[in-house]
Image (cartoon, helix red, strand yellow):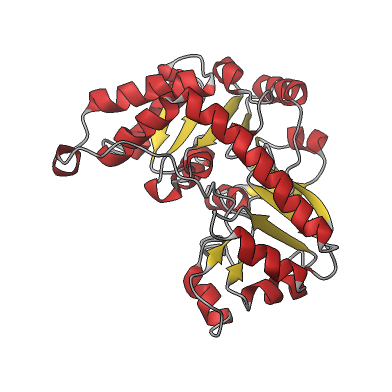
Amino acid sequence: MAGSGIENGVGDAIQHGGNLARARALFPQAPEPWIDLSTGINPHSYPHSPIPGNVFARLPEPASLDSLKTVAANAYGAPSAAHIAGGPGTQILLPIVAGLVDGRKAAVLSPTYAEHARAAKMAGFDVTETDDVDRLTEADLAVIVNPNNPTGRIVQKEEIIALAARMRAKGGMLIVDEAFMDVSDGTSVTGIAGDGGLLVLRSFGKFYGMAGLRIGFAISRPDIVRQIEERLGPWAISGPALHVAGEALSDYRWQVEMRQRLGREAAELELLLRGAGIGVFGGTSLFCLVRDPRAQSLFRHLGERGIITRRFDERPDDLRIGLPDEDGWARLGDALKAF
């Protein structure tokens, strides 16, 4: 899922990364091709096998979805396939999940991905954004993005388990968005998602570098999963997406090697930024968060050179910078040296 942005109303779309048309409008003289560092998506897509032609011609078989849910349960450490609902991206799941929770108060651990607050408002909640984990228990619906986007903050597993227990005791729900958890081993809470009071979201596209495929998962108690699936209806995931995701989630060797590669590249990105005298505040293995009074100047400097990053109008000192692909490192390095 992308970074937070400005909300003009409950139903208004929020600005996110990945909008090259907007980048071209802002910097019409910038050289092409653009280097898009605004999304936090792995630049190295999973090398899936050729997609059989018949999956485009036929509706997806229910057995194919069942198979993917089994593979996803193993990959994410969920209790079973019955604890997983699959949909066309976690973005679609947000308002569905919020609509399953009774109550009027929602609290989001912030600053973070702004769509959680918007989805809760669309579901009729009064939303509070807070940086205090303890305040989340005051709400009926609580949201933590872990690791956080865009700061990289990690709430420890034990703290989340305790918070989920408190939400369960009061009949509330804790949503933990683990969109970037694939690069942060050891803190996922998918294994206890069946205990109640907790729902975990997992995004496929970030780590596997295939955001355009649109796949996401909700992990919770089987009765909650059934309600989500009823609202999604049949064929929520396309046949081509089922084929690719099934392979990728089963490929443990690729996952291990990619985590190591992304860790090295994130360290290289941070080294480049610090070498240019730019303050790095946080991040994950898929992006760095710059917190610097010159962030807006850096955004323009890079944009004029065909490199788009993610800025935040409500936090002008912040800039999120993702990893370039193989062809982008030299251009990024030259641009930072010239800053």
Residue 337: x percent and y percent?
76, 68
Residue lying at the far bottom of the rendered structure: 29
Residue 197: x percent and y percent?
61, 24
Q: Residue 181: tell me if it is visible.
A: no
Q: Nearer the viewer, residue 305 or 40?
A: 305
Marks counted in the figure total 0
The residue lying at 52 percent from left, 30 percent from top is 255
Q: Residue 136: tell me if it is visible.
A: yes
Q: Nearer the viewer, residue 18 or 163?
A: 18
Q: Quadrant of the C terminus?
A: bottom right
The residue lying at 74 percent from left, 65 percent from top is 314
The residue lying at 58 percent from left, 80 percent from top is 26
Q: Is residue 302 left or right of residue 26?
A: right
Q: Is residue 293 left or right of residue 322?
A: right
User: Image quadrant of residue 215?
Assistant: top left
Residue 287: x percent and y percent?
66, 50
User: Image quadrant of residue 294?
Assistant: bottom right
Residue 336 vertical placement versus 111 (above, below): below
Residue 39: x percent and y percent?
57, 55
Q: Is residue 47 left or right of residue 76?
A: left
Q: Is residue 284 left or right of residue 67?
A: right
The residue lying at 71 percent from left, 49 percent from top is 268
